[in-house]
Image: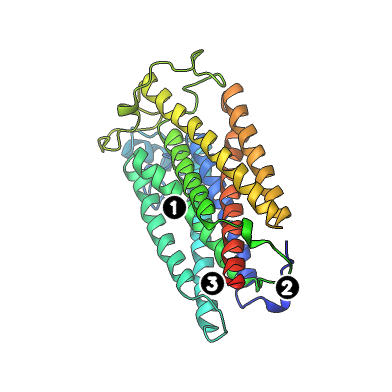
Amino acid sequence: MSMLRKDLSRPGYLLALSAVIFSYFVVTLGAYTRLVDAGLGCPDWPFCYGHLWAPLTDEAISLANQAWPEFPVDHSIIWPEMLHRYVAVILGLMVLALWWVTWRHRNVPGQPLKLPIAIGIIICIQAAFGAWTVTLKLWPQVVTAHLLGGFLTATLLWLLTLRLSGWQPGLRWVNTRYMSMTLGLITMAALIIQIALGGWTSATYSALACPDFPTCQGYWFPPFDYARGFDIFKAIGPNYLGGKLDGEARAAVHHVHRVGALVVTLLMLVLAWRVHRAGLQSLAKLLVGTLAVQVALGIINVYFALPLWAATAHNGVALVLLMVMTTILYRMYRELSYDQ
């Protein structure tokens, strides 16, 4: 893989790279917040029981419990929720600064302008989904959309970093005959669908519906209720903490996520082989290695009943896979355009 040359990097590169790292932390912290059932650690938004952080004195806690009797104050789940909110605010400020830097240097050849604006708009939409996640009491549709929005934000920040890096095609020999944008785009689409399925699995609390692997509840095809499992018109109003689906519906969600994992694995292996033959060996090895870690984490989550570290890492590695795929598509697009 060609080395990035600092002398070719455009204004905003280091800030964009910092935002990528910070966005990864935001997404991972969001996953941790869901996994420790802290999504409703604060029943209001943007404050927490009316406070900037949390009610701390006995009097404040008593008043908070009276105002929100359904959600008694529990500091063990308040801190991850509020930390997630505040780091998301910091990320928003970083994106704002990134937009200002790129706009200020808009006359620099090749300086991207539309992408920072798009990221800023997505950040604003994410803030709305963050509020709805709380006010709609973890409505699965909103929780899944919020997760996808976080992944999209981080991935677009990574794409912006690649564009600002100054990398140029043609710096080393590649065999574009083995590059297939069609295969790459299909694989990327399958990965995005799989991440959405993972978000739905988490939002509906279906991760433990199949406690064995590769079978589910001791059967290859136990009773599944796909209609209820993927009912996207669930009522607004109930508290969805812990989930509302029955066992058969949760098993259906879990099973589809497993099938999706198999499809994505096969597509990525074929893509990695093509990328390797094209001369991008480092990217091919990175894709296969990251995929192997992700599959292993998925199996660990099943066998060991969703250990917190593995479940959190499963979300984080999914984002890494998305970034690796973005890098591969970016490299292929630039090399194919250069070759023409």
**Residue placed under numbered mark 1 in the picture:** 149
**In this view, 143 is above or below 275:** above
- Residue at 46%, 22% in the rendered image: 209
| SS for callout 1 | helix
Q: Is residue 132 visible?
A: yes
State the image coordinates of residue 319 (x, y, percent, origin top left): 56, 48
Q: Disc 1 vs disc 3: which is toward the camera? A: 1
Looking at this view, is 77 or 84 the one in front? 84
Earlier in the chain: of badge 3 and badge 2, it is: 2
Q: What residue would you read off at disc 2?
A: 5
Residue annotated with mark 3: 98
In this picture, is 10 found above or below 236? below
Q: Are marks 1 and 2 in contact (CB under 8 Å)?
A: no
Q: In this figure, which colouring scheme has been used for the structure? A: rainbow
Disc 2 crowd, CA 10 A, few/some/many (<14, 14-19, 20+)? few
Mark 1: which amino acid?
Answer: Gly
Question: What's the amino acid at mark 3?
Answer: Leu
Residue 307: x, y in percent?
60, 29
For mark 1, does the 10 Å Cα neighbourhood hold few (<14), some (14 to 19), or many (20 or more) residues?
Answer: many
Local SS, label 2 = loop
Position of 23 relative to 66 (above/below): below
In the rendered image, the vertical position of residue 287 relative to residue 219, given as above or below: below
Distance Cα–Cα, label 1 vs label 3 = 19 Å
